[in-house]
Image (cartoon, helix red, strand yellow):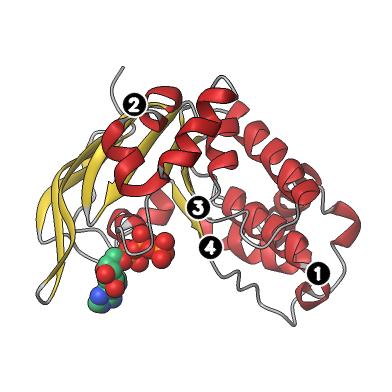
Amino acid sequence: MRPLLEITGVTKRFRGLVALDNINLALAPGEIVGLIGPNGAGKTTLVNVITGVHKADEGDITFSGRSIKRERPDRIARLGIARTFQVVQPFPAMTVLENVTAAALFAGGAASIAEARDAAAHHLEFCGLADQAGKPASALTLAGRKRLELAKSLALRPKLLMLDEVNAGLNPAEIDNALELIASIANRGITIFLIEHLMKVVTRTAQRVIVLHHGRLIADGPVAQVLSDETVVEAYLGRRFAERMAGAGI
Ligand SMILES: Nc1ncnc2c1ncn2[C@@H]1O[C@H](COP(=O)(O)OP(=O)(O)OP(=O)(O)O)[C@@H](O)[C@H]1O
């Protein structure tokens, strides 16, 4: 099957620092892929390069078969790549519904504001926020703001959704709920790239995991295989984690 996203030979430097070093990877339609790695490994830089926030110094990025390397971030978003941010930033004075309506209008395709509002209401329902629609976004809890972020992303009608630490700061019950929501988004055929520190999230949700370390891709494969990979254990996970995973039969 043709990959939805293909990254070939991508390098990104910040002055002397090589933040991404000759990265090659592909995401197939409908996959859930985890992206892990220690602080400073290059995870957010990779997302920023895919979304056009930073331009790659070398290499190419194709989406649905066409190069997006030189496209602007707004154009890339409209082509079907959405992302959430580590720090969620809704328009605080606008209602929850208005926030998602604004995203739907940005995406284009709605014939009128009323149509965008209807689509937004549908996304809020899907994300379990229908009863909060009339509240100002500032009134939401952190878990609520993360759901709002997901609803806004869905309003862009993405083919690829990149979730940057979407579970950070949530309690275990909230994480369970968020994972259920992520799985149901994937069930709609949306490819998910899950940038995570929480290993539990990756092992429970992703089929495949990619590991970055010092800007290099050091592993890419099925979750169980990567988590028992010697290089990954040494570079990132640590011996105790690997033993715990083996004990849990993962
Ligand atoms: N705009 C920038 N200017 C200069 N250096 C940057 C910039 N963005 C990232 N870097 C550097 O690039 C490297 C990779 O950073 P990046 O934020 O991509 O890592 P990360 O894996 O997302 O880390 P974390 O898990 O802490 O978010 C780091 O050394 C970082 O300091």
Q: What secondary structure is found at the residue carrying circle 3?
A: loop
Q: Residue at x 44, y 24 (%)?
A: 224
Type of the residue with mark 1: Leu
Residue 222 picture quarter: top left
Q: Which comes before the other along the chain, label 4 or label 1?
A: 4
Q: Amino acid at mark 2?
A: Gly
Q: Quadrant of the N terminus?
A: top left
Q: Earlier in the sequence, mark 3 or mark 1?
A: 1
Q: How far apart, in angstroms, are the residues tagged by discs 3 and 1?
A: 24 Å
In-front residue for pair 108/9: 9
Crowdedness near tag 2: few (<14), some (14–19) or many (≥20) residues, C-alpha within 10 Å: some
- Residue 213 lies left or right of residue 77; in this view the side is left
Q: Image point 77% across, 66% down: which residue?
A: 96
> The residue under label 4 is which amino acid type?
Phe
Task: Name which of mark 4 and mark 2 comes first in the sequence.
Answer: 4
Q: Which mark is residue 221?
A: 2
Would you name the residue on which mark 4 appears?
Answer: 106
- The Cα–Cα distance between marks 4 and 2, rounded to whole angstroms, is 36 Å
Residue for badge 1: 140
The disc, 3 or 2, on the residue closer to the chain's N-terminal end is 3
Separation of marks 1 and 2 at Cα, in angstroms? 37 Å
Nearer the viewer's eye, disc 1 or disc 2?
2
Q: Which is more N-terminal, label 3 or label 4? A: 4
Q: Amino acid at mark 3?
A: His
Q: Is residue 107 above or below residue 3?
A: below
Contact (CB < 8 A) between labels 3 and 2? Answer: no
